[in-house]
Amino acid sequence: MSYSPPSQHDLAVGMLESYIANVIDPDCSPIAVKASANTAILIFRTLGVIDAAEDVHYTERLHRIYERRQGEAL
């Protein structure tokens, strides 16, 4: 069995999923993580690593989770 390294897309999606997990984590600053994640989404989309549908999916998902965290803080 041969080893094949993960694709750029796989790495990008894994990174975005990690950002989302960190926004959910109560020990992390949601605003800092959201800002970093939005920058990563922009970079991945600009480089063509993720497509437009994935851009929308991760942007909306991140926003929903962030808003929920902000509501919990009140």
Image (tube, helix red, strand yellow):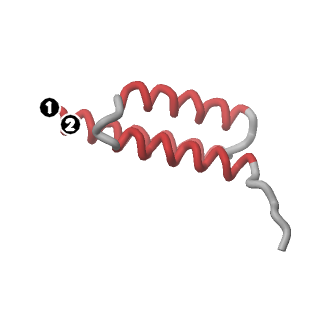
Report the side of 69 relative to 19 (left or right). Answer: left
Which residue is disc 2 drawn over?
Answer: 71
Residue 53 vs residue 36, the one in the foreground: 36
Count of marks overlaid on the render: 2
Residue ranking furthest to the bottom: 1
Residue 46 place in picture, x, y as percent: 71, 32
Report the side of 53 relative to 29 (left or right). Answer: right
Residue drawn 59% across the image and 49% down it? 14
Q: Are marks 1 and 2 in contact (CB under 8 Å)?
A: yes
Q: Amino acid at mark 2?
A: Gly
Residue drawn 67% across the image and 37% down it? 45
Residue 66 place in picture, x, y as percent: 34, 37
Which residue is disc 1 drawn over?
Answer: 74
Residue ranking furthest to the left: 74
Residue drawn 60% across the image and 49% down it? 13
Q: Residues within 10 Å of mark 1 (few under 14, many from 20)?
A: few
Residue 43 vs residue 23, the one in the foreground: 23
Q: Secondary structure at mark 2?
A: helix
Q: Residues within 10 Å of mark 2 (few under 14, many from 20)?
A: few
Residue 48 place in picture, x, y as percent: 74, 40
Quadrant occupied by the C terminus: top left
